[in-house]
Amino acid sequence: MKKGYFGDYGGQFVPELLMPPLLELEQAMDTIMVSKEFQDEFAALLKECVGRPSALTFCPNLSHDIGVNLWLKREDLNHTGAHKINNTLGQALLAKKMGKKMLLTETGAGMNGVATATAAAMMDMGCKVYMGAVDVERQSLNVRRMELLGAEVVAVESGTRTLKDAINEALRCWISTQETTHYCFGTAAGPHPFPLLVRELQAVVGREARMQYVERNGALPDVVCACVGGGSNAIGAFHAFVPDESVQLVGVEAAGTGEPGCFNSAPLNLGTDGVLHGTKSKLLQTDDGQIMPSHSVAAGLDYPGVGPEHAALQAAGRAIYGSVNDEQALNAFKTLSRREGIIPALESSHAVAWVLENADKLQGKNVLVNLSGRGDKDMDIVEHVLDQGE
Amino acid sequence: MSVSPLNTKIREANAKGKVALVPYLPAGYPTRERFWEELDKLDAAGASVIEIGMPFSDPVADGPVVEAACLKVLEDGITLQWILDGLRERKGRYNAALLLMGYLNPVLQYGPERFARACAEGGVSGLIIADMPIDEAGFLTDALKPHNVELIPLVGLNTSRERLEMYAKDAGGFVYMVSVLGTTGQRDSLPARVKEKLAEVREVFDIPVALGFGLKHPDQVAPFAGLMDAAVIGSALISHIEAGGDAASYMDIWTS
Ligand SMILES: Cc1ncc(COP(=O)(O)O)c(C=O)c1O
């Protein structure tokens, strides 16, 4: 297989000016990241700062309600409230060892921004976060958190003013700051080596979950399910299970309002092959190859592309990708909160919603959902929508 | 292989002791009709190569001026097909060599083979794809070659000697050296490192060297006499038109 590819997907479709920092990063992965010293330090950070291993929680009430044994991998219990911290601490540690002084990133829901700002503060590095102006407004709590952590948050006014445009601006910024700055890419998309790097840093989720599950049940789960934005939490959850052919891997995309022809964030379900942000994958695009605006009530899923490894897993038939709409996700948000006392992020609510929506087909099965984050950040949105609806 | 018209046109200007001018204008800018008028004016004013921008929704190598112009023409419904059809109708009309510049995805969706054929039918001699480093370019150069369309390498201040040599192996029309570690857009001064890198690029490539990104006035390139053969001008031209000027009055700045 060609270097930097997963099947037909992946690659490095970036301006030549970005090839040197990508090659430098690849080199650092091959030397620094594989060293015992790095791995030990990273493991210590995950344990002592993130709070790993995160719990594996059985949901007795909801399982009883729906006739499906529902298990949650609790990334919501991590420091800063989502899986993103696994990735940002790993990348920040690597960047520090590469001699970089600054972390640059993009954020949609703000979770990657908060996690990067946190890692920067811990490593005594500067931090700049690009965030679409729409997201600055709908995830304002996270903007305040990032600023408190010492990061500069730049609201992006161009294009659709969401995650896609924040990535454009961050890539532009990286071209001119590459000598001192590491682009702490927030998900398993983007140009090689990011999809690989982010997967390796998030694979801890699935490794732990697999061990915990087998320890408790003496067998593997039937289904592992996770929401898919760029795809980092899902690929992290899937990776350790890929060789286990009995385990069905299910990614869940955001169908937006769910009406036919609506803007959505489901490129694996509704997109076609194309190139965006340095990688070949599935994309929401017009026949002319222009990128379409995406939509989801969950800002962290609101992206017209997806990581290339997911496109490859789908093409190979190793994983399937479903979708749920905003209303179904909001319903799952409420249901999990009331039945289990766990308030999930709206992104993670999509994965829970898929289980609720497909419960009839999953009767008696053991389903492990990666609960990628907690829902505190979404209280404003949810109250607003529920007020209107009820 | 025959010598590319891109090369020939630049050398014609150089033979008269001049730096060749390579203006950039997004297709359909400022309006559908005026775009073709401005193209005629650029040609009449002595442009050696005209770079026509193929708009893309997410132009990561571009600064705010080019991005805004591209988003505007996309709103006006400009497509690759519109550009290629317009050029086919006007084939043979321009003295300048023609170049299309854009991003990979629209070309991919059009189909590389079909695109290469349409370029040839429209009199287009070269292509710049801003998000296509040489490592990924094989399939595209394969599609372009039978139609004598050149893929122009973009290199920068941070491109290693090794990578310059990779690009030099296959390059035909000219090499485009990006003057800044940054995106397109006018700048008042260029980095000091430009001179040294231009000399290195000159040494590695045996085709004309163009300098671009950030240029707005001929005084900026005066220090590089002898190290560069062509100047690419984009944002400054767009801003000039935006402010009410036209291509003819803009070209005066560079030719008088
Ligand atoms: C809690 C949470 N889950 C999931 C996602 C989606 O991203 P990814 O698919 O990369 O995990 C985000 C992104 O912001 C998030 O904040």
Image (cartoon, coloured by chain):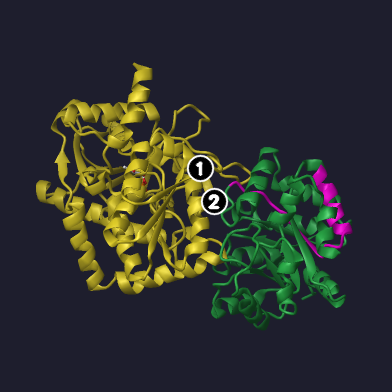
Which quadrant would the C terminus of chain B be assigned to in this image?
bottom right
Residue B54 in the magenta stretch? The answer is: yes
Q: Nearer the viewer, residue A193 or B236?
A: B236
Taking A77 as reference, is A273 left or right?
right
Helix, strand or loop at mark 2: strand
In the rendered image, residue A127, in percent from the top left (x then y), is placed at: 38, 56
Taking B88 as reference, is A68 left or right?
left
- Residue visible at 75% across and 44% down in the picture: B30
Q: Classify 10 Å Cα crowding around label 2: few (below 14), some (14-19), many (20 and above).
A: many
Label 2 to label 1: alpha-carbon separation: 9 Å
Q: Which mark is residue A228?
A: none
Which quadrant would the N terminus of chain B be assigned to in this image?
bottom right
Residue A102 in the magenta stretch? The answer is: no
| Label 2: chain letter | A
In the rendered image, residue B11, in percent from the top left (x then y), is placed at: 82, 74
Q: Is residue A235 visible?
A: no
| Label 1: chain letter | A
